[in-house]
Amino acid sequence: MAVLLIVVSALASVLAAASFGALLISQLRLPLFRQERGVIAFILGAGCMSLIVFAMCAAHIYYRGVILAVGLAAILFAWYRGALWNRETPAFGPLDKFERALLVLFVPFVVLYLANAIAPETSPDGSSYHLGIIAHYVRAHGFVPLHTTVYSSLSEGVELIYMVAFTFGRHSAGALVHLIFFSAAAWLMVCFGRRTGQTKAAIAASFLFYASPIAGVDGSSAYIDCATAAILFTVFYLLYVWRTIEESNGLLIAAGLLCGYAFAAKYTAGIIVLYALVLVVAKARRLRPALIVAACAIVLSAPWLLKNWHYTGNPLSPFFNRIFPNPYVHVQWEEDYKQYFKTYDMKDLRMIPWDATVTGNDLGGLLGPVFLLTPLALLGLRRADVRHLWLAGLVCLIPYPLNIGTRFLILALPFFALALTETIAMANVRVLLPVLMLAHGLLSWPRTPPGLLSLYAGATWRLVHVPFKQALRIEPEERYLARTQVGYLKARLIDKLVPRGEIVFSLSPVLDSYTTHEVAVFFQSAFGEDMADLLFTGQKTDRQAVRLMRFRIPPTSLQRIRVEQTATVGAGEQWAVSELRLFNGGHELPRDPAWRLTAVPNWWDVQSAFDNSRVTRWRTQQRARPGDYIEVDLPAPQTIDQVDVETSADNWMTRIRLLGAESPAASLKLLTDKIEELPIKPQPYARRMVTLEMAARGVHYLLIDPVDYGARDIFEDPEVWGLKELGQVGENGARLYHIEPLAPAKATQ
Amino acid sequence: MRILLLIPIALLTGCITQPQTYAPPVQREPVLDGQAPKPPKHILQMSDRETDAYIVQDIPRGSADPWRWTGKRPTVRMFVGDPNGLKLTADYSIAEATFKDTGPVKLTFYVNDKPLATVDEKEHGVKHFEKPIPREMLKASADNLFAIEIDKVWIAKQDGAHLGFILASIGLAPVNPSSKETTH
């Protein structure tokens, strides 16, 4: 029954999407053959349906009944209009025997992928944020700000299609929809060969793509890369039809919409619009066709920019935070993130081709060794089709240096696979393509024998077996997940013990999609980083206010007081201020609600420097720069003769000076750059102070894994942290804690 | 065309936020004396199932009884963050049954394999030990080893088991600065 629900949910979602697409294709009168029409209808319709689901989420009317009604209406209307199936639609001729024989090689991989897609979803990103975020939307009946994860700011055009399937069939239905996208891309590659007269080469290319280990593991889980590849290839396909068959506006509208959908699927895939615009302008020698493409692209891409603008103030969140500063993503996080994904810590980037095709050790997966032959496709450049494939593939690769993971090559894989096989086909040696396919199949099949994958690819991300028992739920989903996924056990523990609506802070990832709670993982948001900084401050005194930088000045009437950082520091060093205090005659000026505080950068956190806590601090959250400042504007001038800046011991290179002005309108003058530095004794109850601070910021539950930094300290004596253990995963697993409030009688002291 | 180009630029620049000002927040109370929990302690109770995780040798695991027989040199490991102001504490018993055969025994308390104190037990019965640990004997922010070695073990005639003494708890506690704690 569960399997039936999964399959029906996925197929119904795909059919609904295809109905939207079929109606649009009919309306635009796209000159498509029957074999390609259904696939393009699905991919184009997915773009349309994602926009409709987006609108429903924005309006908070995403209910099961509503989406069911919309989907059924689309299917019935498309059926009524004859858009879904029309006998009069022309078809390609039948495949010959040899071509049909080549298609047989796909069968084992279809079975492999079906079993893995229908089996309980366990992929790292799929079961955490791809499905985890839409699960929140389903529960909330629409978009909700999820500031505990930066991933909620990424465009989610494909996930919204999974969301429809997930609403009824849960996780595996989402994964199955991805597999249908993936398979659709492979089929469209075959169709491309039918159009170019290179059917055998196209079947071979399609197989290289479909059987590629990285595409297989990605495409049979709730990732989005293969779906994005399908969208990109459809753009290419429609433009191919436009330039070779019919220069109609309908094709440009469809291609433009899909360019927008590519951006809606994945920011970096939006680069395909560049290919589309260049091609259209070059071919038409007019601007209008390009404007049609651009305008249609905006229709499907702009909503995501607006959503981010609305929720974060940064339309391109989680990137470009220097240009669009916001409290939800730290600039330092963005820079660290980008830096890592540019190299994956590889010692020698010249090894990328080898790693991405053969071992997958560093780049998280492998394309398959046959892709080492890709340079051979350069020999095919004398053919126009191959040149276009190269051009599209290279355009898709433009963002690749930003993230060199193997799966980011999937977007360009259909183009290079086709270029390669069409080039090989030019040799006119009939046996070459079948041998290539057979070799790729054997090298990519996970089980040995007959496959060889496990012999040369180690622990990299790839499929490892055909999970029939799990797919058919002979082994119940719950049991399988509990047996194999620690992250699932954590999620269940949270759901069992944490009251509804409470955020859980964790230093390690959890399979988010299996819990109904928001889990703030420390490296996934500014909020999480702030919580982690607090937690670590409890244990590491160098993060507390242990240095006092004292400015002494003659008694001066001031209304603006600014402390400015002046040094150029090393990468990663931030300026921090735990407390900033003003004095006159040895007495601290009491902090008045009428004071106005600000800082540059990261002004949202400035209150942490004025909260009277030595375990909280304002930080630049990016490399400290000369000119960074923290400022107090008083409601009226006051006499000040001393300014104390309390800071932590992890920003040694920073230098500060004191500026001031008599009135808001007066310009700031240098008061002194001489400081007296004094030590401050670490806080004796820092651990308890940080948990109280976390509670004050809305976090009352912590999930600590034994491998987490500082876990031992908490495990050994949770009481000193003010934590009460609620439960544990297994014998030696993660522990869930509640931050206990202060006893009422004592809290009033 | 120019207008078309300017629209997104205007939109994007319109998104850019300017530094904002805030009022001082609710003031935290930095000193939690009287409200805060007690300072760190690390007492391993033999009745606690978690104690098994800290045992290094000569203490049987898996027991939920309030005491456990030890071997010759029961040893545990405990994490110490701040090594200042800690004392080693232990509750144990010399069993009458073994004392009859062994007579008076000597117990030596070790911290990181360095002797902290030696105690002569001339009578059987319930005992308590505590002594401040010099800071230099402890490793900060690291696991430390704590052991009690008995000079004579009792050997069971039936199964040859080597029994030392009966341990109820062992651990670290803060030295009370107002008292003159030196030895048990």
Image: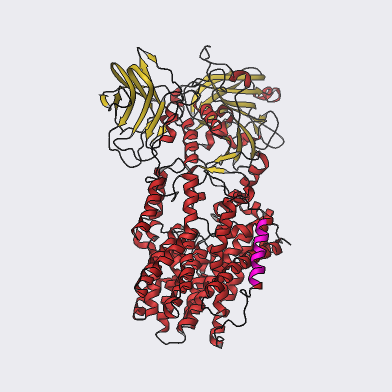
Vertical order, A313 against A480 (above or below): above
Q: Which is more toward the observer, A37 or A176?
A: A37
Q: Which of A28 and A548 is in front in this view?
A: A28
Residue A501 is situated, as x and y percent measured from the top left of the image, at 63, 40
Q: Is residue A77 magenta?
A: yes
Based on the displayed image, in which of its 4 quarters is residue B140 positioned?
top left
What residue span does the magenta drawing correspond to?
A66-79
Chief secondary structure of the magenta portion:
helix
Q: Which residue lies furthest to the right in this view?
A: A1
Q: Say above or below: A557 vs A167.
A: above
Q: In this view, does A594 lie to the left or right of A481?
A: left
| Image position, residue B171 (x, y; %) | 57, 26
Q: Can residue B149 be seen in this view?
A: yes
Q: In this view, does A186 lie above or below A264?
A: below
Q: Where in the figure is residue B117, as x and y percent of width and height?
A: 52, 21
Q: Does the magenta stretch include residue A639?
A: no
Name the quarter where the C terminus of chain A is drawn: top right
